[in-house]
Image (spheres, rainbow, N blue to C red):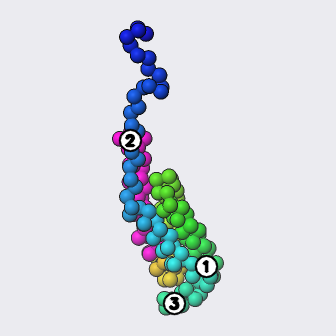
Amino acid sequence: MSATTPATTPETRPQTPAAAPREVPAWISRYFWASSAINFVVAGPGVISPRRSAELIGDRPPSPEFPTRAWSGMAVMFGFMFQEIARDPLGKRAMIRYGWAEKLVSATATTIGYRRGEAPRSLMATIAIADWAQIIPFIYAKYRLDQIADEEASGG
């Protein structure tokens, strides 16, 4: 180093500002809070009393009750997961794939069972609201969050 060139140390080196983190669209967090609430409202009664839940919408009681109760319990559990995603959508975005995969598997199995006369209309109604209607928005939210994460990782 010559006498006329100042030394550059980490303390004197000009710092390049880090790119500001991208803002997560507010709709994503709100959507997962709403999905959580939908799961609790639609599936919660099926855990407590599948028979009464079916009667409330004018359907025959499921027989046996176990499959409806088991599905409802899983839907309630996923409702808690959706709360976690809603609190930190970007950080918990990997969990979204489990949400839409669960919804796709449950919706497909229940729809097949309903068409064969094996699943009650009440369960099919809850699947339509809690699962089929939410698969595409879940996949889109994951796609948007992955875009944001990729932009942050590339510094832009």
What distance separates the C-alpha of mark 3 from that of mark 1? 14 Å
The image position of residue 61, as x and y in percent, is 57, 88
Please indicate, yes or no, whether residue 150 appears anywhere in the rendered image.
no
To which residue does mark 1 refer?
A: 47
Q: Secondary structure at mark 3?
A: helix
The answer to which of 25 and 101 lies nearer the viewer is 25
- In the image, residue 39 sits, relative to residue 155, either above or below, namely below
Give residue 19's mark: 2
Q: CA distance from mark 2 to mark 3?
A: 54 Å
Magenta stretch holds residue 138: yes
Determine the residue positioned at 59% across, 68% down: 77
Task: Name the residue beneath numbered marker 3.
Answer: 56
Q: Residues within 10 Å of mark 3 (few under 14, many from 20)?
A: few
* Residue at 44%, 17% in the rendered image: 7
Assign a secondary structure to mark 1.
Answer: helix
Q: Residue at x 61, y 79 (%)?
A: 47
**What is the magenta range?**
128-156
Residue in the picture at 54% in, 90% down: 55
